[in-house]
């Protein structure tokens, strides 16, 4: 039996690795165009980097602090989890190598060769050496390691050439950092093809010339991954203590470069180099991976510029231009929202509708106030510009910025200064809770009359991700929801998370309790012989309480249908326990990011939310779930769920043995359906 599975539970880390394997499957799928397969390789690789920095890093933290701790689902200790992760990752590296090998073969058909001299199968063009001598060599800073020069600090995810050499009977190690200032890709064009060499391969190829006076015994490309699990979620925030949280966070983020090693990647057979680095970097052999091709595939995103434009277009998905939804008041999104609820389904509907509303709110004389939560935004964001404009036009603008959005901390620190300079009121958040809610409130004042326009969504206020993430958005003038939104911003600004709302469910106050009660209500219906059904769509399911309640629902006869893109710690199909539960994951062109919670067979209650069913979302984050009240929007979301449940092309089904399978029937691809049929 798989040690990552126990009864009806699946290990969180194992489930994540399975999800990333499904991403990798898209890189190998013949259904996807060549350049899109390249993107999936890059996404898989960056996902894996972050997994090791954060999740593996956190396990090493736990191993250090409490080595006998037991994971609450499978009972595994930190070391048992780590050993299993490293073992499974070797399988993923092998699968990636095969996918990359096939992609390189397809690129050759498009007259592009990725040169890799480590494979010793390509005659090197002399122009590469000329580029090295003229452009790269002056930027290199080689270092010889000896008693006077101990091992230098290896930066997280930076590439190095490491050599084992000898001279006059003395052996030593040399290190050459691959310079960041060089072009990422060096190209040589011939009459028949374009040859491309990544900068690290160029440095590797000609490193012997840097150490030309020495006898080179071994040579390797090396990349180290460090623990980046800076615990920004759990800073103690005493509001009577006078310190600047932003300065504290800057210090914490900068400390990532000095954290312990969690993974060492190297190329080729280099036993002495490997042993030397493992000893000096405190890396165990099981943490090492031999990489045949590239370490970092971000450059795959730029390969289209080396292919003729018309041909490159044929090797990518057809461009998506999200539609502009029809408005009751064509000249005004705000007036249309006042006339009736609006629904946006990204990326199939354009974010321009929302941006136009915010732009007009920044200048509309009726608007007294704009309040918004910010988690991740574009570096050049129209949203930030509209908020600055609104403040300069005399509107009261309050922005709750989550500084601790992992890996976006620096951008968020910068934009807080930009917003403050424009006169906006900036709130950092609430104590030990991340503000993950996606909510904006526009308050209009006309004489003595106050009205509200509230936007609630499942995804970030980010123009870039709105083009590639599937997210749902409701814009409503419902007064009760507007008053709830006003209470939300008022209380969060004062550091209070314990407040009631009439319509909105807010974590940590009552979202979890309310959803658990709704599951129980379906159990009660099933036990009394009445129709009962639960359909949920989310990114991850890890919370033990929800898993146990779903098991109880299945045992009672409730039909439970779960669409979970990523981590799922619930095992379906277990006899007499989870037989009535179906779990499917959809991985495709767009990142499935929307969260929908639907309770009931007939006239169901429907919520969209910023929250997944994870312990952190329910207990350590400020999240919102909003009821779908408008009947037309309810019908649209129910239709969406129907199509998602019918997907049998891009969907993978989790089976009772813990494996995901694809039925791969000719039928329904939900994302393609939504592309073809605006709902």
Image: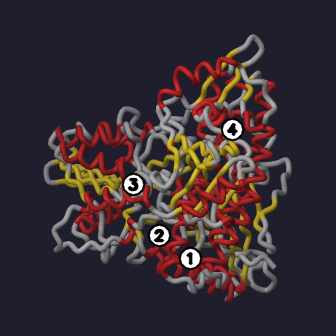
- The quarter holding residue 31 reads top right
Of the numbered discs 3 and 1, the one sitting upstream in the chain is 3
Residue 149: image x %, image y %?
46, 51
Q: How much space separates mark 4 and mark 2, taking CA atoms?
A: 33 Å
Q: Is residue 1 left or right of residue 364?
A: right
Q: Answer few, some or many: residues within 10 Å of disc 2's Cα (few below 14, many 20 plus, some between 14 and 19).
A: many
- The quarter holding residue 547 reads bottom right
Disc marking residue 617: 2
Q: Answer few, some or many: residues within 10 Å of disc 4's Cα (few below 14, many 20 plus, some between 14 and 19).
A: many
Q: Is residue 334 left or right of residue 595?
A: left
Of the numbered discs 3 and 2, the one sitting upstream in the chain is 3
Q: Is residue 632 above or below residue 494?
A: above
Write down the residue under mark 4.
38
Disc marking residue 543: 1
Write down the residue under mark 3.
375
Per the image, label 3 sits on a secondary structure element best described as: loop
- Residue 643 visible in the shown view: no
Q: How much space separates mark 3 and mark 4, taking CA atoms?
A: 29 Å
Which residue is painted at 38% across and 40% down in the image?
379
> Is 321 or 20 nearer to us in this picture?
20
Of the numbered discs 4 and 1, the one sitting upstream in the chain is 4
Labels 2 & 1 near each other (Cβ < 8 A): yes
Per the image, label 4 sits on a secondary structure element best described as: helix
Q: Is residue 522 left or right of residue 411?
A: right
Q: Answer few, some or many: residues within 10 Å of disc 3's Cα (few below 14, many 20 plus, some between 14 and 19).
A: many
Q: Is residue 487 above or below residue 419?
A: below
Residue 468: image x %, image y %?
56, 43
């Amino acid at each position: 039996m798989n040690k990552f599975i126990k009864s009806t539970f699946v290990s969180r880390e194992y489930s994540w690795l399975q999800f990333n394997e499904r991403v990798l499957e898209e890189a190998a799928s013949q259904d996807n165009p060549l350049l899109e397969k390249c993107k999936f390789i890059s996404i898989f690789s960056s996902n894996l980097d972050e997994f090791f920095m954060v999740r593996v890093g956190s396990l090493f933290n736990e191993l250090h602090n409490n080595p006998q701790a037991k994971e609450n689902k499978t009972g595994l200790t930190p070391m048992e989890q780590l050993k299993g992760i490293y073992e499974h990752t070797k399988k993923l590296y092998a699968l990636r190598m095969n996918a990359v090998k096939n992609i390189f073969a397809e690129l050759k058909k498009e007259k592009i060769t990725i040169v890799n001299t480590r494979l010793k199968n390509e005659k090197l063009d002399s122009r590469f050496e000329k580029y090295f001598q003229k452009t790269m060599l002056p930027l290199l800073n080689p270092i010889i390691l000896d008693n006077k020069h101990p091992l230098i600090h290896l930066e997280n995810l930076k590439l190095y050439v490491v050599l084992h050499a000898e001279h006059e009977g003395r052996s030593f190690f040399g290190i050459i950092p691959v310079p960041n200032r060089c072009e990422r890709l060096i190209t040589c064009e011939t009459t028949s093809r374009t040859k491309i060499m990544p900068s690290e391969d160029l440095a590797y190829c000609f490193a012997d010339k840097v150490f030309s006076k020495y006898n080179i015994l071994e040579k390797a490309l090396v990349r180290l991954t460090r623990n980046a699990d800076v615990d920004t979620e759990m800073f103690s925030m005493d509001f009577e203590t006078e310190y600047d949280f932003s300065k504290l966070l800057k210090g914490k983020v900068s400390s990532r470069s000095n954290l312990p090693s969690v993974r060492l990647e190297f190329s080729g057979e280099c036993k002495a180099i490997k042993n030397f680095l493992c000893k000096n970097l405190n890396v165990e052999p099981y943490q090492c991976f031999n990489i045949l091709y590239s370490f970092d595939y971000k450059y795959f995103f730029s390969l289209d510029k080396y292919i003729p434009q018309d041909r490159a277009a044929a090797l990518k998905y057809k461009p998506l231009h999200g539609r502009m939804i029809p408005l009751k008041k064509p000249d005004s999104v705000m007036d249309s929202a006042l006339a009736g609820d609006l629904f946006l389904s990204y990326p199939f509907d354009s974010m321009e509708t929302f941006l136009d509303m915010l732009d007009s709110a920044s200048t509309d004389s009726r608007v007294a106030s704009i309040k918004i939560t910010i988690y991740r935004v574009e570096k050049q964001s129209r949203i930030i510009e509209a908020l600055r404009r609104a403040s300069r036009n005399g509107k009261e603008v309050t922005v709750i910025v989550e500084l601790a959005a992992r890996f976006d901390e620096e951008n968020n620190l910068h934009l807080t200064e930009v917003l403050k300079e424009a006169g906006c009121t900036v709130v950092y958040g609430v104590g030990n809770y991340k503000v993950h809610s996606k909510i904006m409130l526009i308050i209009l004042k006309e004489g003595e009359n106050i009205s509200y326009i509230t936007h609630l969504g499942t995804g970030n206020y980010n123009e870039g991700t709105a083009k590639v993430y599937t997210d749902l958005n409701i814009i409503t003038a419902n007064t009760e929801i507007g008053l709830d939104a006003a209470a939300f911003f008022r209380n969060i600004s004062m550091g209070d998370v314990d407040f009631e709302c009439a319509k909105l469910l807010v974590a940590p106050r009552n979202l979890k309790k309310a959803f658990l009660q709704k599951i129980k209500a379906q159990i009660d219906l099933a036990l009394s012989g009445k129709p009962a059904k639960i359909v949920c769509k989310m990114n991850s399911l890890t919370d033990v309480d929800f898993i146990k309640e779903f098991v109880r629902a299945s045992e009672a006869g409730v039909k439970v249908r779960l669409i979970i893109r990523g981590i799922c710690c619930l095992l379906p199909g277990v006899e007499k326990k989870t037989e009535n539960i179906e779990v499917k994951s959809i991985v495709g062109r767009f990142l499935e990011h929307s969260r929908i919670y639907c309770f009931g067979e007939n006239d169901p209650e429907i919520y969209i939310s910023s929250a997944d069913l994870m312990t952190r979302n329910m207990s350590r984050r400020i999240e919102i779930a909003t009821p779908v009240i408008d009947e037309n929007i309810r019908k649209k979301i129910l239709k969406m769920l129907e199509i998602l449940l019918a997907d049998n092309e891009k969907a993978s089904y989790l089976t009772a043995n813990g494996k995901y399978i694809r039925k791969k029937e000719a039928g329904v691809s939900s994302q393609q359906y939504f592309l073809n049929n605006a709902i």
